[in-house]
Amino acid sequence: MNFYNRDFLKLLDYSEQEILYLIQLAMEFKKKKKMGKKHDYLKGKNVVLLFEKDSTRTRCAFEVGAMDLGMGVTYLGPTGSQMGKKESIKDTARVLSRMYDGIEYRGFDQAIVEELAKYSSVPVWNGLTNEFHPTQMLADIMTMYENFGSVKGRKLVFLGDARNNVGNSLMVICSKLGIDFCCCAPSELFPNSELVSQCRKFAEAQGSKILLTEDVHEGLKGASVVYTDVWVSMGEDDSLWKERIKLLTPYRVTSELMSLANEDAIFLHCLPSFHDINTKIGKEIHDKFGITEMEVTDEVFESDQSKVFDEAENRLHTIKAVMYATMKK
Ligand code: CP
Ligand code: NVA
């Protein structure tokens, strides 16, 4: 398996074997980290992290991952660099490639990260765009492996805004790995039909299914993984909250909904999550619309079925695996 100098932009570009290899590598890095074994295999190299949107997990996973591998790291946030304002993506890519050995990008259109990669001579990693969130997926599937030992033939149901980066990416990775994917949402929020057709081809080759349904009973039946995400994503307009709350309240992951899934089902969420009103936005939504929980109840979030913090930790190991695989000769 040779990933040297390859970009990691979306999972549509990666095969089942390649995805599984990266997850296996992440598991090895996790073991090394737990045992306190040094793994600074990329000493002397440097990476730059470009964030046009906020982040906790992705940024920290790239920073700690790079430092564990012995590398230097530069973080460029939404303000403070010339990118996009005085300097095009094409020029930014060519400048940064002369100084760094790898570039992470989080921002808006997928086309931006694709362009960055086109003009960069070093690997570019997608840390989230409006369309896709591929590094998140590796951590999610790794968490499934840790809980079930295998993933093929299991069913993952995503409830919520299924057209967002996480919903799209889950459909892609599930169909590539032979996991039944169910999008359980109002039809207005189903993923775009072109991507669905593309994924159906992968699923057919695997003998797995893609189901789009508005019915929570149908959606949750036989599910091993119940997954949700915020109802309004970064970069979307705040005016959407009202409509999304109305559309998605029936899809809030409650204990009642969890009981419709398999008894040993786990709950996953990419985070951050609005499961209480201990956040600025959570409080504002509460004051405006009177709700105390959004996509998941606090009860489910804090339950034994919830594996969200293992999932968050696995961001580190999987992102480290992606950097290592694409940078090590
Ligand atoms: N899940 C995730 O990408 O989290 P951050 O936005 O904190 O990076
Ligand atoms: N769909 C969310 C994911 C955050 C990790 C967003 O884009 O805001």
Image (spheres, grey):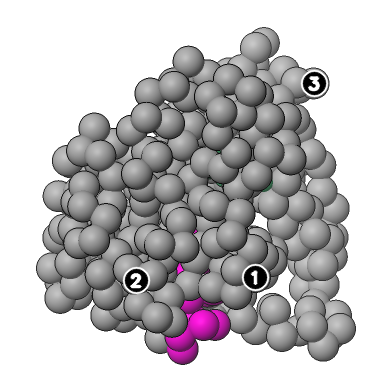
Q: Residue at x 14, y 60 (%)?
A: 201
Density class for disc 1 (Cα within 10 Å; few <14, some 14-19, many ≥20) is some
Q: Residue at x 82, y 48 (%)?
A: 73
Q: Nearer the viewer, residue 268 or 169?
A: 268
Residue 282 placement, left or right of 153? right
Residue 180 placement, left or right of 1? left
Secondary structure beneath disc 2?
loop
First of labels 1, 3 by sequence position: 3
CA distance separating discs 1 and 3: 33 Å
Q: Residue at x 75, y 21 (%)?
A: 79
Labels 1, 3: front one = 1
Q: Position of residue 146 (x, y in %)?
A: 54, 82
Q: Give the label on residue 264, or none.
A: none
Q: Position of residue 80 (x, y in %)?
A: 80, 21
Where, by quadrant of the figure, is residue 156 drawn? bottom left
Give the residue number, with chain letter if any, for mark 3. 80
Q: Nearer the viewer, residue 22 or 87?
A: 22
Residue 322 falls within the magenta-colored stretch: no
Q: Is mark 1 within 8 Å of ligand 1?
A: no
Identify residue type, mark 3: Gly
CA distance separating discs 2 and 3: 47 Å
Give the residue number, with chain letter if any, for mark 1. 310
Magenta region: 136-149
Q: Nearer the viewer, residue 29 or 95?
A: 29
Looking at the image, residue 217 lies above or below residue 329: above
Q: Position of residue 117 (x, y in %)?
A: 51, 40
Give the residue number, with chain letter if any, for mark 2. 261
Identify residue type, mark 2: Ala
Secondary structure beneath disc 3?
loop
Q: Residue at x 79, y 67 (%)?
A: 69
Looking at the image, residue 317 lies above or below residue 75: below
